[in-house]
C-alpha cells in the first residue's frame, strides 16, 4: 500500500465534510459549485455554462443557516467556561499552546468550531525539532487520511500536508509541496539493521518521487523520546462530536446543511416560475401569410384569412402556491434542526419556545462539550508525561448546562421573606440568584445592596 492510501471511513466521510465546509462558506461558495448543488433542470435544456443556467442559478436563494448555528453553539459552550487546571510546568500552554501561537482558550474555541462543523478534529502532541517543551499541533478532519489501532492504542496516523518551500530557481518565490507525515509504532532495529523485537514511536516524512506521481520516498525519520526513553504510543487524540475514538463521529449540523440545500434547489424552481409568469409571454399568429413584425398595445393584428388566430402563450403559475408551501415546510424543518430560530422570526414568539428549541440541542452540545474537554485533557496529559509532570493534576472542565433557569419571582419573594423572618439563611437566596444569572456579586457586596433594593420595591 502507498503512503497516500485513504482509510475507507475517510473516503466515506470526506464528501460530507466538504459539503459542511461549503455550507459554512455560504451562498457564494454554494453557487460557485454549480451543478454539484444545483442540477440543470430538465426543461431548461441547456448546460451549466449557458446564460440561461447562470440566470436560473442567480435567482436562487441559499439560506445562511449553518454558520450562524455554529457560532450560536460555540457561544453557548462559552457561557460558563471554567479554565483548565494545569501543573506549574504546563502553565506556558495557557498563552502559547500550538505552533501558530494559539492560547489554550483559543485552541478550545477552534476545537468547538471544527467539531460543530465536521464532527472531528485531531490534536497531535509534538516537540520542536531542536528540543524544547511539547506543544499541541492541530489537524482538521480532511488532513488525516489514514489510521490504525490496536485495541485502544493508536498505532498509525497519516497526515496529508502542504508546506511552503523556497523556489529553487527564483529566490523571491515559494512553492507548495505535498508531503505525508506518518506517526506510527514501528519495529525497532539495532545499529546493524537487525530487529530487536521491541516497538517504538517514529515520525516519518514522505514525498513523491520527482516526475513519478505514483512513487513515494521517505525523506526524514525521527524517533521522539519521553525523558530519554522510547515511546510506545502515538501521542494524538481524535476529538469527535460524541467521543475521542478514531472512528469518525456524527456531523452535528449535517441535517441543517442538507435541508438548506433542499431549500436552495426548491427556491431556484420557484423563482424561475415567478420569472416566467412575469416575463414569459410569447405571441403567436396562425393562418395568415402576413404576420405582424411587432406586437404591443399600439399594434393591430388583422387578417381576412379564414381560420386565422392570434394570441399569447403564458405561464399560468398554477404550481406557485404549492412551491411556496413547500419552501415554508423546509424552513420549518430547518428551524427544528438548528439552534438558530429561522423563518419569520416573529417578535411575538414566546421566550419559552426559544428556550425549548435550544434545549432540544442540549444533547448535542453536551456531547461536544464533553468530548472536546476530554480530548484536550488527554492531549495535555500527554504533554505532562513528556515533561515528567503529574498528569493527574490536569483537569479540563466541560460545560454541561447551556440554558439558564428562569427566575421565579414568587420563590425570590418567599426566600427574602424567610430571610427577614430569620427562617432562611441569606446564602440560599444569593446562590439561587447566581444560578439564574440575575447577579454575579460576592456575598458581602450582595448583602449591602439587596436590602435597599427590596425596600425600594416595597415602597413602590
Image: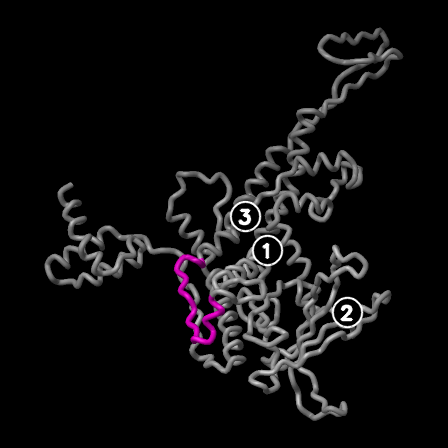
List the residue tagged with mark 3. 334
List the residue tagged with mark 1. 254
Report the side of 113 relative to 444 (left or right): right
Please determine whether, in this image, residue 71 is positioned above or below residue 268.
below
Q: Is residue 285 magenta?
A: no
Residue 398 % position (x, y): 44, 66
Q: Nearer the viewer, mark 2 or mark 3?
A: 2
Please determine whether, in this image, residue 294 is positioned above or below residue 393.
above
| Span colored in magenta | 77-94
In this orientation, which residue lies closer to the viewer: 74 or 326?
74
Marks 2 and 3, the one that precedes in the sequence? 2
List the residue tagged with mark 2. 207
**How far separated are the C-alphas under marks 3 and 1?**
11 Å
Q: Nearer the viewer, mark 2 or mark 1?
A: 2
**How far separated are the C-alphas under marks 2 and 1?**
34 Å
Marks 2 and 1, the one that precedes in the sequence? 2
Residue 115 % position (x, y): 55, 61
**In the image, which disc is placed on residue 142?**
none
User: Residue at position x 26%, y 61% from top?
Assistant: 431
User: Residue at position x 56%, y 55% from top?
Assistant: 253
Q: Is residue 86 magenta?
A: yes
**Is there a contact, CB below 8 Å, between mark 2 and mark 1?**
no
Q: Farthest front residue?
A: 171
Per the image, label 3 sits on a secondary structure element best described as helix
User: Residue at position x 50%, y 52% from top?
Assistant: 71
Report which quarter residue 289 is drawn in.
top right
Amino acid at each position: 500500500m502507498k503512503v497516500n492510501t485513504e482509510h475507507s471511513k475517510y473516503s466515506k466521510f470526506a464528501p460530507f465534510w466538504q459539503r459542511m465546509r461549503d455550507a459554512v462558506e455560504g451562498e457564494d461558495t454554494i453557487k460557485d459549485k454549480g451543478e454539484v448543488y444545483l442540477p440543470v433542470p430538465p426543461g431548461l435544456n441547456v448546460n451549466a455554462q449557458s446564460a440561461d443556467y447562470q440566470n436560473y442559478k442567480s435567482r436562487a436563494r441559499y439560506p445562511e443557516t449553518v454558520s450562524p448555528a455554529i457560532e450560536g453553539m460555540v457561544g453557548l459552550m462559552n457561557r460558563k467556561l471554567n479554565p483548565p487546571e494545569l501543573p506549574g510546568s504546563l502553565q506556558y500552554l495557557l498563552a502559547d499552546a500550538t505552533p501558530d501561537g494559539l492560547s489554550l482558550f483559543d485552541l478550545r474555541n477552534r476545537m468547538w468550531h471544527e467539531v460543530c462543523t465536521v464532527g472531528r478534529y485531531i490534536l497531535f502532541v509534538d516537540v520542536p525539532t531542536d528540543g524544547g517543551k511539547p506543544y499541541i499541533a492541530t489537524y482538521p478532519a480532511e488532513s488525516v487520511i489514514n489510521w490504525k489501532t490496536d485495541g485502544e492504542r493508536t498505532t498509525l496516523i497519516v497526515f496529508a500536508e502542504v508546506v511552503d518551500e523556497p523556489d529553487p530557481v527564483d529566490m523571491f518565490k515559494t512553492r507548495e509541496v505535498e508531503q505525508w507525515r506518518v506517526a506510527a509504532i514501528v519495529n525497532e532495529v539495532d545499529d546493524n539493521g537487525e530487529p530487536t523485537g521491541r516497538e517504538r514511536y517514529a515520525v516519518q516524512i514522505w514525498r513523491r518521487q520527482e516526475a513519478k506521481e505514483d512513487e513515494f520516498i521517505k525523506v526524514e525519520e525521527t524517533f521522539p523520546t519521553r525523558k530519554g526513553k522510547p515511546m510506545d504510543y502515538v501521542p494524538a487524540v481524535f476529538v469527535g462530536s460524541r467521543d475521542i475514538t478514531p472512528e469518525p463521529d456524527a456531523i452535528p449540523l449535517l441535517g441543517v446543511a442538507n435541508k438548506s440545500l433542499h431549500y436552495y434547489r426548491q427556491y431556484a424552481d420557484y423563482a424561475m416560475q415567478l420569472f416566467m409568469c412575469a416575463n414569459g409571454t410569447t405571441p403567436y399568429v396562425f393562418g395568415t401569410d402576413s404576420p405582424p413584425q411587432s406586437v404591443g398595445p399600439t399594434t393591430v393584428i388583422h387578417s381576412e384569412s379564414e381560420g386565422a388566430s392570434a394570441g399569447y402563450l403564458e405561464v399560468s403559475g398554477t404550481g406557485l402556491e404549492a412551491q411556496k408551501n413547500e419552501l415554508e415546510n423546509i424552513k420549518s424543518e430547518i428551524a427544528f434542526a438548528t439552534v438558530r430560530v429561522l423563518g419569520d422570526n416573529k417578535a411575538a414568539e414566546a421566550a419559552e419556545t426559544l428556550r425549548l428549541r435550544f434545549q432540544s440541542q442540549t444533547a448535542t452540545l453536551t456531547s461536544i462539550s464533553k468530548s472536546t474537554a476530554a480530548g484536550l485533557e488527554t492531549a495535555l496529559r500527554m504533554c505532562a508525561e513528556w515533561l515528567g509532570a503529574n498528569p493527574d493534576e490536569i483537569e479540563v472542565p466541560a460545560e454541561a448546562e447551556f440554558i439558564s433557569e428562569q427566575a421565579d419571582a414568587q420563590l425570590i419573594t418567599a426566600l427574602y421573606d424567610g430571610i427577614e423572618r430569620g427562617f432562611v439563611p441569606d446564602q440560599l437566596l444569593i446562590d439561587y440568584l447566581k444560578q439564574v444569572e440575575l447577579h454575579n456579586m460576592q456575598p458581602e457586596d450582595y448583602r449591602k445592596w439587596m436590602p435597599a433594593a427590596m425596600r425600594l420595591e416595597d415602597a413602590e
